[in-house]
Image: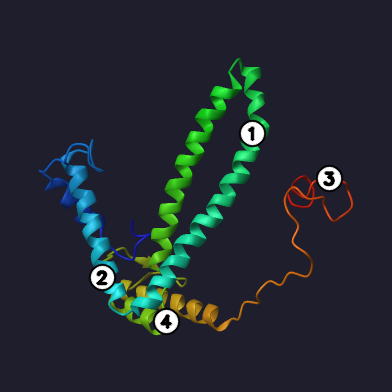
Amino acid sequence: MNLNFPLGVPEGEIVKSAQSGTVAPVPDSLFDGLSPAQFAVCTFISEAVRKAYEVKISFENPQALKEVERYTILSAIDRLWQEHLYEMDSLRTSIGLRSYGQRDPLIEYKAESYKIFDELMVNIKTEICHNIFRSASSLMAFENFLRNIPKQTTHQQTSAFGGSAPVEDKKSQQGSDIVSEAAEELSKEKPKPKRTGPKVGRNDQCPCGSGKKYKHCCGK
C-alpha cells in the first residue's frame, strides 16, 4: 500500500482497523465475500487514499490536472495492452506443447489466456494508482503536495555510514530526490517523431522488398 500510495501508514494502524471491524459488506457489492476485518481494512485504506488525493488536487490546476490524469491512464493502458498482445502471441506459439502432457491445447489456451487477461487488468489498475500520485500539472504543485503528505512511518533507515538515520530526514531527502528528478524530466524537450516515408498498412507489401505482408515482415 505504501509503495503505491504516498500514505506512510504504519502496520499497527492497519491491524488496529482490522481488529475493530464489526460490519459485514453488503451482499453482491464489490466487497462481497470479505470478512468484517477485511472489509474494515479496505474501508480504512480507501479513506486514507481519498484524503491523500484531496490534498493533492488542492494544489493543482483543475483543467491541467484533468489532462495529466488522462495521459497517465491512457499511457498505462496503451503500454500494458501492447505487452499483453506480445504475451498472447507467445502463448499461442507454445501452447501446442501441452499436448505432450496429454492435455487439450484449446482448453489450456482458454485457461491461460483468462489468467493473463486478469493479470492485465490488475496491472493496469496498479500502475494507474502508482503513477497518479507521481504526476502533477506543475512542479510547484508537486512540491506542495510532497510537503503536505502524511509522515507517519516509524521504520528506522540505515545510513551508508552505519547507524540509523532519522525518518523525517530520510523522507525529506526522498522528497527532494523526487522533485529533482521531476524538474529534470520537465526541463528535457522530447523530440517528436517524424515520418519520413508513406504510411504502410499491415496487409500491404513490405517496403523492404521481401514480398511478404508488412505485418509478417518488418511490422512484427
Q: Residues within 10 Å of mark 2 (few under 14, many from 20)?
A: few
User: Do the residues bearing badges 1 and 2 touch, measured as CB atoms within 8 Å?
Assistant: no
* Cα distance between the residues tagged 2 and 4: 17 Å
Front-most of residues 209 and 89: 209
Front-most of residues 11 and 117: 117
Element marked by disc 3 = loop
> Looking at the picture, which amino acid does disc 3 mark?
Lys
Element marked by disc 4 = loop
* Cα distance between the residues tagged 1 and 2: 45 Å
Mark 1 lies on residue = 92
Q: Position of residue 209 (x, y in %)?
A: 89, 52
Element marked by disc 1 = helix
> Looking at the picture, which amino acid does disc 1 mark?
Arg
Give the answer, above or below, for where 184 lies relative to 1. Answer: below
Which residue: 45% across, 75% down? 178
* Cα distance between the residues tagged 3 and 4: 48 Å
Q: Is residue 62 left or right of residue 35?
A: right
Mark 4 lies on residue = 138
Q: Earlier in the sequence, mark 3 or mark 1?
A: 1
> Looking at the picture, which amino acid does disc 4 mark?
Ser
Q: Earlier in the sequence, mark 2 or mark 3?
A: 2
Mark 2 lies on residue = 54
Give the answer, above or below, for where 100 lies relative to 145. Answer: above
Residue lying farthest top?
Answer: 102
User: Do the residues bearing badges 3 and 4 touch, measured as CB atoms within 8 Å?
Assistant: no
Residue lying farthest right?
Answer: 209
Mark 3 lies on residue = 212
Task: Specify the quadrant that holds the N terminus.
Answer: bottom left
